[in-house]
Image (cartoon, rainbow, N blue to C red):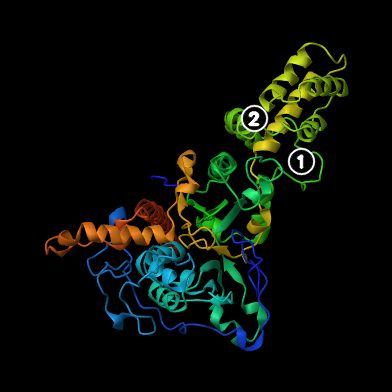
């Protein structure tokens, strides 16, 4: 695919790239109003194929009547009884990314509701996987609505067009409909049953080692930390745990999220989630702590493999682009990570004599002075291990492991708009992470402008009777990302259907 590049109550101080709280909201009287339609009986979308061999295109049998992504003509207002007028909204040139009109136009014309439904439902037919799923909306006035649920993508879309949230989050599948939680006799009857295993990587966790940017700012140089993290985590999840259906999603500003949709991952209890998060966690300690990498030797195969991946990035992305030890205090930090006092004294003396010495040269000095015999008691093995630990400290993924440990955590939905940057939270092809450009990801206003430009240039072509009208997303730079999402879902649905056939076969053999 081409790569054109929370908290409750008041969200002004919330981390826009983070996850929302996992504790249920307290009931603040009238402000905690349930919004939207009741969870009526689900209406069928498409019958699930019964053939053993299912073609990918059969899973997405689009027809000309599909109105999820309407063409630019005026739509039938009766289709959405509670939504605003169905014609394409007029966007003011000075509109902000999260203005209600912008959000309405985006959700009405570009957001892939049907594919989101299939991804979360794991089937073409409505099921509790979607109907008992929690959604949480952040509204324009920063009101935050939790425990929203919908039996179908149509009703989710209808409610979002009505509310026009600035963003929304996805939570777990519960044992009962989230809207009915207050009517249950026993509180234990309402508990999280399943949720994708998720991982969150945020560049603010790299602020102590990235030198080009800090806080919410990013550039191509520091995005390499996310690229390295995706490479290391993705291969570990696939090779070490056997997961297949992994989708990485750009957070819209400074990070990335991983969603693992394999059934084994979805039904894992919190203890197993914590164990996997612990397996992947290597960097420990805050900015003021000492040595952050303390691993046993010989290295675990996962760490040995990770070093092989990361050493390719260390020379260019860290030593040259970040130049992490250019300043004296940072160079002193490097010396603290080396095991020999004699070597450290010699290095310190050399670097003080050459204040402008680069990190590339300082890294090379470690070996050259060690070989020169500046320390009679130098342990070569200990030095090698210390250098390996330094490479890991400056390159290994810094995960927000708390996000991964519990099913109950909510995480921002793919394809929502980041309110600060206007960029869409698009999927990242994990196999081509090096090619992803976060600064080239389209903004919502850019996409709406692309639709208008396409319509102007192809007005006569669209009017022809024998020409199939394109859905609006197909007219924009969002198309490759939606297609990637669609292909990911196709693979997931095939896997789910295989699991279902195996269960049916096992049930038929029972006496």
Looking at the image, which residue is at 53% across and 46% down? 242
Tell which of 38 and 463 is nearer to you: 463
Looking at the image, which residue is at 61% across and 85% down? 31
Mark 1 or 2: the one toward you: 2
Within 10 Å of the Cα at label 2, are there few (<14), some (14-19), or many (20+) other Cα atoms?
A: many
Looking at the image, which residue is at 63% across and 37% down? 302
Within 10 Å of the Cα at label 1, are there few (<14), some (14-19), or many (20+) other Cα atoms?
A: some
Position of 315 relative to 166 (above/below): above
State the residue position of label 1. 292
Q: Quadrant of residue 147?
A: bottom right
State the residue position of label 2. 319
Q: Earlier in the sequence, mark 1 or mark 2?
A: 1
Q: Is residue 501 visible from the viewing direction of this image?
A: no
Question: SS for tag 1?
Answer: loop
Q: Position of residue 60 (x, y in %)?
A: 31, 60
Q: Is residue 254 left or right of residue 109?
A: right
Gap between marks 1 and 2 measured at Cα:
19 Å
Q: Residue furthest top?
A: 372
């Amino acid at each position: 695919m081409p790569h054109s590049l929370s908290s409750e109550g008041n969200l002004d101080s919330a981390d826009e790239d983070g996850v929302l709280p996992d504790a249920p909201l307290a009931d603040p009287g009238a402000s905690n109003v349930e919004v939207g339609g009741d969870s009526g009986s689900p209406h069928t979308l498409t019958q699930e194929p019964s053939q053993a061999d299912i073609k990918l295109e059969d899973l997405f049998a689009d027809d000309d009547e599909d109105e999820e992504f309407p063409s630019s003509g005026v739509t039938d207002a009766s289709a959405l009884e509670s939504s605003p007028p169905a014609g394409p909204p007029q966007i003011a040139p000075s509109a902000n990314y999260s203005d209600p009109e912008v959000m309405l136009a985006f959700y009405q014309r570009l957001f892939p509701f049907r594919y989101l439904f299939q991804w979360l439902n794991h089937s073409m037919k409505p099921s509790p996987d979607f109907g008992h799923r929690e959604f949480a909306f952040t509204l324009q006035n920063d009101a935050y609505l939790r425990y929203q649920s919908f039996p179908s993508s149509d009703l989710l879309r209808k409610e979002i067009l009505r509310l026009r949230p600035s963003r929304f989050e996805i939570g777990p599948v519960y044992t009962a409909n989230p809207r009915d939680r207050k009517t249950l006799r026993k509180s234990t009857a309402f508990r999280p049953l399943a949720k994708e295993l998720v991982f969150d990587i945020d560049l603010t966790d790299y602020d102590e080692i990235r030198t080009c940017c800090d806080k919410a700012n990013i550039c191509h140089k520091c995005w390499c930390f996310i690229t390295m993290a995706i490479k290391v985590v993705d291969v570990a999840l696939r090779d070490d745990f056997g997961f297949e259906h992994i989708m990485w999603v750009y957070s819209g500003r400074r990070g990335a999220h991983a969603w693992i949709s394999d059934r084994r991952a979805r039904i894992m209890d919190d203890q197993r989630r914590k164990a996997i998060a612990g397996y992947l966690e290597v960097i420990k300690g805050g900015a003021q702590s000492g040595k952050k990498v303390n691993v046993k030797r010989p290295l675990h195969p996962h760490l040995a493999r990770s070093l092989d991946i990361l050493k390719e990035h260390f020379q260019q992305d860290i030593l040259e682009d970040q130049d992490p030890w250019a300043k004296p205090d940072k160079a002193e930090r490097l010396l603290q990570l080396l095991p020999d006092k004699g070597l450290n004294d010699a290095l310190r003396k050399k670097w003080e004599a050459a204040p402008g010495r680069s990190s590339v040269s300082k890294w090379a000095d470690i070996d050259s002075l060690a070989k020169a015999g500046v320390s009679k008691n130098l342990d070569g093995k200990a030095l090698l291990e210390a250098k390996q630990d330094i490479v890991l400290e400056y390159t290994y993924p810094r995960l927000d492991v708390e996000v991964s440990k519990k099913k109950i955590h909510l995480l921002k939905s793919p394809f929502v708009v980041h309110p600060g940057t206007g960029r869409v939270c698009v999927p990242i092809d994990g196999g081509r992470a090096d090619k992803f450009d976060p600064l080239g990801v389209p903004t919502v206003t850019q996409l709406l402008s692309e639709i208008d430009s396409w319509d102007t240039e192809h007005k006569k072509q669209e009017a022809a009777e024998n020409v199939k009208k394109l859905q609006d997303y197909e007219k924009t730079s969002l198309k490759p990302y939606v297609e990637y999402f669609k292909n990911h879902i196709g693979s997931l649905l095939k896997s789910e259907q295989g699991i279902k056939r195996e269960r049916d076969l096992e049930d038929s053999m029972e006496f």
